[in-house]
Image: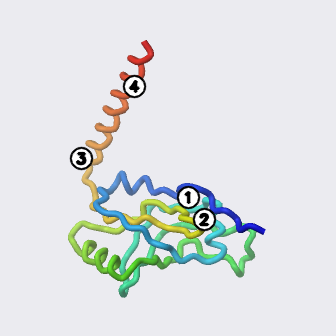
Amino acid sequence: MAPKQAPPGVVADNRKARHDYTIEETFEAGIVLTGSEIKSVRAGRVNLRGSYARVYQDEVFLYEAHISPYEQSGTYFNHEPMRPRKLLLHRREIKRIDGLIRQKGLTLVPLKLYFKGRRAKIELGIARGKKLYDKRDDIAKRESQRDIERAMKSRSRE
């Protein structure tokens, strides 16, 4: 019997992170999950909003990421939805991340959770918080780009 195929594409995307932060550098990390957690991830029951990662004793952990309990699993075998999860990175990457985070104003935020082959991966971003005026500038640029595209589309119809 063939193994169950992972769904293609991104399982969870943290769009709020791109709105609140300027992403300076990204890293791909593996994530340590239990059996019921991986089943919930495959079902797409993940929320990354408000989550963050930290370096603790030369290891990286993901905090505040919500993976819903798997309904078909019994209460004994199910997982805690908000538990800290270990992330798998090379030692060099961890040291680089730790050095960057120690700079003032930088943090480590998860951007998206996806499958690469059969393995769950998480994309982490070294991020700097945006000021309110930066967010307004981004919104204004996005709206003006949308208006330009709308005008071009209506012009090509004529």
Residues marked 4 and 2 touching at CB (< 8 Å): no
Q: Which mark is residue 41?
A: 2
Within 10 angstroms of label 4, few (less than 14), some, or many (20 or more) residues? Answer: few
Separation (CA) of disc 1 from disc 4: 30 Å
Amino acid type for the residue under numbered disc 3: Tyr
Name the front one of labels 3 and 4.
Answer: 4
Separation (CA) of disc 2 from disc 3: 36 Å
The location of residue 65, given as percent across then percent down, is 50, 68
> Which residue position is annotated with label 3?
133
Identify the mark nearer the N-term, 3 or 4: 3
**Residue found farthest to the right:** 1
The location of residue 129, given as percent across then percent down, is 28, 59
Picture quarter containing residue 26? bottom left
* Residue displayed at 47% across by 70% down: 64
Picture quarter containing residue 95? bottom left
Q: Which mark is residue 150?
A: 4
Amino acid type for the residue under numbered disc 2: Val
* Residue displayed at 50% across by 77% down: 85
In front of the other: 55 or 71: 55
Q: Secondary structure at mark 3?
A: helix
Residues marked 2 and 3 touching at CB (< 8 Å): no
Identify the mark nearer the N-term, 4 or 2: 2
> Which residue position is annotated with label 1?
11
Residues marked 2 and 1 touching at CB (< 8 Å): yes
Identify the mark nearer the N-term, 1 or 4: 1
